[in-house]
Structure formats: structure tokens, C-alpha cells
Image (tube, rainbow, N blue to C red):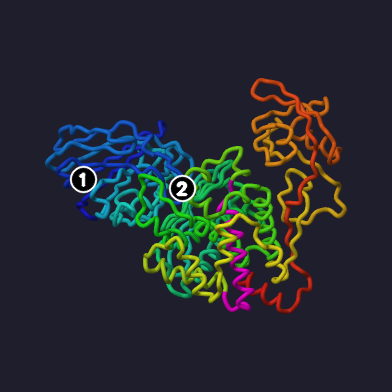
Amino acid sequence: MKTSYSVHYLIVPQNPEAHLFEVTCTVAHPDALGQVFSLPAWIPGSYLIREFARHIGTLKATCNGKPVKTIKLDKHTWQCAPCKGALTLTYEVYAWDLSVRGAHLDTTHGFFNGTSVFLMVHGFEQQLHGVEIKPPVGKQYKEWRVATAMTRDGAKEFGFGSYSAENYEELIDHPVEFGDFDLVSFRAGGVPHHFVVTGVHDADLDRLVRDVKKICDYQIDFFHDGDKPPMRRYVFMATAVGEGYGGLEHRSSTALLCSRDDLPQKNQKEISEAYRNFLGLVSHEYFHTWNIKRILPAAFQPYDLTQENYTSLLWMFEGLTSYYDDLVLLRCGLITPQTYLQIISETITRVLRNSGRTKQSVAESSFDSWTKFYRPDENSSNSGISYYAKGSLVALALDLLIRRDSQNKKSLDQVMRALWDFFGAKNIGVPEDGFEKLAQKVTGLNLKTFFDSAVRGTGDLPMRDLLEVFGVDYELRAAESEADKGGKPGKKNPRARVTLGAKMSGSHEAKLLQVYDASAAQSAGLSAGDSIIALDGLRVNAASLEKMLLNKAAGDVAVILAFRRDELMAFDVTLQPAPKDTCTLTLKEKPATHSMKARDAWLRG
């Protein structure tokens, strides 16, 4: 165990009942002009200013046992008066954010990201940092363990005690989970991997670890072809709750939030849709081990955690990762080709239902993530597009285009490996035009027109034509119900359906959450937030309204009564036919031989 550090932290779950951590930061040789401390305003991987410092409560400083005056310079920065000797800062952190981004503490477990609890010591960012993690006091906590990928520096494996990080950036890139969790372990690429599950569940962990190992083995081989990956160990930290979903990548670990029903259930033979989605999330976050944690934008080198860091490349880092996450499930045998096409179909459907795709490019969506993507409102679907969803389709289109125009001699797989070799392995940031230039260099193709249209433009992608070459049929039809998300064939000779062109809450109340551009609802004057109470003189709720609309035809005028705030209003709504925005992809039964070979090369890798 090291006995001295330039910067050392002690973190104690001081009061789990009140959700309070006590953190002590000791600086051996503080700045002679007065040491400055600050807490990050955002966490890498989640591009929104979150102002974690708002959770810091009492804060005091001492030197040689005497109080040191501390002043606050701005919302997340403090400065201590000059002192001679080691400076100790002690503060409380309120931890009640049950997400993958912040810190959470109660009597069942504790979790934190370093960005929420560890003040950065200015001038010492590149120094060795030490951390001692203490357990809470009480007999009920005697079985608690610690899960983190941080380097142990005296602590036993999965134990409380001393850990270290080479610098501050590494310190905040190792989240910590502690409690009475379940743990399963395996090796992938010669590296120990651990999967921790916190919360009440009845999951088949043996099956989970078998499936996750396939994902990890494939991805390691994808980037390294037999060589060892860049991490010495890897930790998955999953918190199972009644309802939840999310993930946040780190250099050697990932934090996951899931519904307990997302986990594989005992005696469950097939992969349920919920479990498939969870495996896709695991695959997504693990792929980030390379694509964003080590292959990253030049704009993020180094991170400036005090303010927004702008880049137009998030479509590449999140979109390409979103493309490969489910493709990996197919390639390692966890899902079938038709299931994979169903997933793509659902993504195409989501994108087509957003008129904002015609107004915002994925490059613009990336740049504006700080103000738009992470702050969606009732007009988001009309004004913007997700760089995750459309970004994944851009990646798919680019892969198919490269394969088609190179006669299957090149692919996006080779571009991704080159990204690692040229940028990730050398710790060089990707310039804003770096991916486009590298893709052209690796493939030998002129891709400027594609990037102008697909990345910088707002037109629809040529998915039908590209998929046709690979023996896949592309069909667009009208949704058969509000719950129809695409991916499956529609009924033969379906009944013509009309729509208001609005998204309603899933609750009993028929409350409009979004009203789509040029829709019947918008044309009549209905707005998001309106609560519909009657149609043609009959009281309705969300379910009965949809049923009543089944008896209407396009062009019919329906009289809708709705409350806007506390005012009752009447609207004459001219109903419109449901648009053909619901996608189904299917494998052609007897494609041409060249199409079959091209399809197999794409889907099997």
C-alpha cells in the first residue's frame, strides 16, 4: 500500500438513511496562492450540463488542525486561503440519483461516479490520486463488497480499502458499486471480466454470463484479432429495479440500469424481447470500450468538464455503436437474421415517424446534443433527429454502400479497425473530418456525396435500394395500431385506419404528449398537453378513443372536446389516413446467388 499521494480521498457512506457521503480530500502540498477545487459540470458519455456540485452540502477546510477560510468562486468552484502544510477539505454529498450518471446511497447499496463525489484539485490533475473507500457502520452491512475496475492499492479483491488512479481523468472513469450484490466472473480475450447485479431479482446468472462472454469475445477479436484488449480487467455493474433502462460506458467498466424482468429468467429457453434488448445494451456499452473511450473526438482531448465540449461526430460514436450492438448479437449467434432485421425495421420506423429528420442533420444533432437531445420536449420529434437512431441507419447504409461498390472487398468493419489502429491505439483524437477521410482511404471509394447527403443533409437514406442488393425486401405500410412499432409483417388486406397524428400518454387519460407536424390534430388546433375527454359527444379515454377512430374514415370530421389547462375547448378535426411510415424488412426466400453471398458476408462478418 502506498503511504503518500499528492491527492488523497477518503469516502465514507456516513449516513445511508439520509443518502449522505462524507468525502475528505487531502492535498499534501497545496497551491501557495490558495488551492482551488472544482467538481465537473458533466460526465463523459452523457452530454448535458448536470451541475453535480448542487449536491454538495457542508464544506470546510483545515490545515494543521486549524480552520482555513474557503470562498466559492462560482457554482462548482471553491478556493481555500493559503496555508503551510497539508490541506484537508471535508464535505458532504447528497446521493439520491438512481441513474448511471450520478451517485446513489441508501441502506440497500451504494453507487457513485467520481464526477459526483471527487472534487478536482487544480494543478494536480496529472498526479497520482489515492482513494480509500470505507464501509458504512452497522452489522447489517457486514456482507457488503465493493465492485470497481479501479486499481487496488491495498484493498482485497471486491473489498473496501485503498485504491489508486494515475490521474484525475482516470479517477472519475471508474464508477464504484458496493453492497450485498451477486457476482459472476469469466474471461474474455485473456482478461478477467466480472458481472455484478444489485437489487432484487431471480435471474439465471449462469446463462447471462455465457451470453455476455460471447459478446465480449467477439468484440475483442473484432478489434484485436487475437491480441489482448487494452484493459486489464472489466466490470459490468447492473442495478435491477422494477422499471428502468440505461447504460454509461467507462474505460474498463460500465454502469447499467435495467428492469429485473430484462434479465434472463430461470428455465427460460428462448431469448425474450426484454432480454434481447438488455443484451443489446450490454453490447452497446462494451463496444464503447473502443469507440468513444479510446477512439474519441479531438474535441474531447482533453475533456473540459466545466463547460460544453462541441463536436459534430457524436452520430459516429453513438450511431456506429448503435449499429454494431445488435449486429454483434447476430454474429455471435444470440439472435437470428430475421430478428436482426426486425430490430432494424423498428429503428427505420422510429426515424420515419420523426418529421424532424427533414430539418436537422445527424451532424447538427451531434453538435446540439447539449441543448436539444438530452432536453427533449413536446416538439422534439418535429424539430430534430436522434443521432443514435438515424446515426445507426447512416452506419448501416454506409456499410452496405461500401460492400456494394467494392464488390464486397471492403466493409465498415475494416474502417472500424483502421479507426483503432490510426487513432485509438495511438491515443490520437479524431478530427471533425477524420472519419470521412479515413473511410475513403480504407475503401478507396469517393464517399463525399454520401456524407453530404446522409451526415450533413436531411434527406432520407436510400435504404430500399441498398437492402435490395443484399437480398432483403423493404416494405412500408400504415401502422395497424398505436402500439405498432414495425418490424413485423402487417395483416393481409388491412382495414384502412385514420389517425389524429399525435402521441398520447400511456395512462388511462387521453392526454396529448406530442402533436406531429401537418397532422389532423395540429391542423385543428390541438396542442401537446391537451386532455381529450370526448369524441362526437361520447366520453373517451386513451383506449376507447383509439377504438372509436377505427370506425372513422379519412376525410370525416370529428368533434373533439378537450381541456387545455382548466379551459374546455372544442375542435373540429378532419381525420387523415395513417401514413405509411411503418417498416418491415424480410429476407428474400430465393435471392440471386451474388445477393446471397453478399448478405451472408454482411450478416456473418
Q: Secondary structure at mark 1?
A: strand
Mark 2 or mark 1: whose residue is earlier in sequence = 1
Q: Are marks 2 and 1 in contact (CB under 8 Å)?
A: no
In this rendering, the count of numbered labels is: 2
The quarter of the picture where residue 536 lies is top right
Q: Nearer the viewer, residue 239 or 477?
A: 477
Q: Nearer the viewer, residue 591 or 150?
A: 591
The quarter of the picture where residue 427 lies is bottom left
- Cα distance in 3D space between marks 2 and 1: 30 Å
* Residue carrying label 2: 47
The residue lying at 86 percent from left, 55 percent from top is 492
The residue lying at 87 percent from left, 53 percent from top is 493
Q: Residue 582, percent across and down?
A: 73, 52
Count residues near mark 2 (Cα–Cα under 10 Å), then give few for <14, some for 14-19, many for 20+.
some
Count residues near mark 1 (Cα–Cα under 10 Å), then give few for <14, some for 14-19, many for 20+.
many
Q: Nearer the viewer, residue 266 or 241?
A: 241
**Of the numbered discs in the image, which one, if any, rests on residue 543?**
none
Residue type highlighted by circle 1: Val
Q: Is residue 406 magenta?
A: yes
Where is 121 relative to 330, above or below? above
Where is 546 relative to 332, above or below? above
Q: Residue 602, percent across and down?
A: 63, 71
Where is 555 relative to 311, above or below? above
Residue type highlighted by circle 2: Tyr
In this rendering, position of residue 348 left or right of residue 85: right
Q: Is residue 144 magenta?
A: no
- Mark 2 vs mark 1, foreground winner is 2
Q: Residue 99, percent across and down?
A: 49, 43
**Of the numbered discs in the image, which one, if any, rests on residue 27?**
1
| Residue segment shown in magenta | 384-410
Chief SS of the magenta region: helix
